[in-house]
Image (spheres, rainbow, N blue to C red):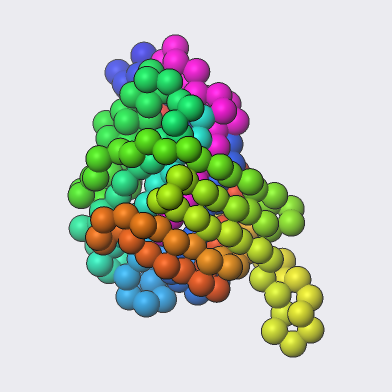
Amino acid sequence: MSANGHTAWRIAGEEAVHCNCDWGCPCQFNAPPTTGRCEAVLALEIREGHFGDTSLDGVRFARVYSWPGRIDEGNGTRQMIVDERATDKQRAALEALDSGEEGGAYFEIFATVCPDRRDTLIAPIEIEVDRERRVSSIRVGEIVEARSEPITNPVSGEQHRAQIVLPEGFEYTTAEMANTVHARVTADEPLAMRLENSYAQLNEFAWANA
């Protein structure tokens, strides 16, 4: 058990995120979203992790979010998708994290601002991330398909590299900015979405409840 009475857990790995905001994503700066509302899809691969004595090394999962307005105003909807290769114990561990009841800022915050929690789905998840090149691809069964590439200079066509650094960030401390070439989510409303030439971020994550 952790010091606060919860099951001790930690996960670290790679994350790829796509949302409907313009590049830079105003939400990262506590500003209103580009279109007045937020929708996002992301996939994560745990490089190393555990929930109690259950190893989460190599586990993949995806998350889909939708908010009618600003994230901090709440009333959002969320759904988790777990890779079909995860064991029953690993799936149960991720369900526990998703509840927000086992601590950790990331899961606690999103459980609060997304009270509409849809049933978790199981599907094959493929993730390829190259942060240095700002390239990624995600496929989650027939539910999610997304791809990012570097932002390019509109005049010269050269690749443009930019980062967001949040020293006290609860999701990441440094993220590479990229362009969502396209992203498609086929899910029940309000989680269905299609994105093109919008914000994407590639980052390491390291979350824990202690």
Judging depth in this view, the residue of 33 and 140 nearest the camera is: 140
Residue 41 part of the magenta-drawn span: yes
Q: Is the magenta stretch mostly helix, strand or loop?
A: strand
- Above/below status of 207 relative to 70: above
Image position of 192 (left or right of 172): left
Judging depth in this view, the residue of 126 and 104 nearest the camera is: 126
Q: How many marks?
A: 0
Q: What stretch is highlighted in magenta?
A: 40-58
The N terminus appears in which quarter of the rendering?
A: top left
- Above/below status of 161 relative to 155: above
- Above/below status of 122 relative to 72: above
Judging depth in this view, the residue of 67 and 196 nearest the camera is: 196
**Residue 154: x, y in percent?**
70, 84
Q: Residue at x 41, y 76 (%)?
A: 34
Image position of 17 (left or right of 112): right
Q: Which residue is drawn at 45% across and 45% down?
A: 141
The C terminus appears in which quarter of the rendering?
A: top left
Q: Residue at x 25, y 40 (%)?
A: 119
Residue 55 part of the magenta-drawn span: yes
Q: Can residue 164 be seen in this view?
A: no
**Residue 169: x, y in percent?**
50, 49
Q: In which quarter of the image is residue 164?
A: bottom right
**Residue 143: x, y in percent?**
40, 51
Q: Residue furthest front?
A: 142
Q: Can residue 142 be seen in this view?
A: yes
Q: Which residue is drawn at 50% across and 55% down?
A: 145
**Residue 27: x, y in percent?**
42, 65
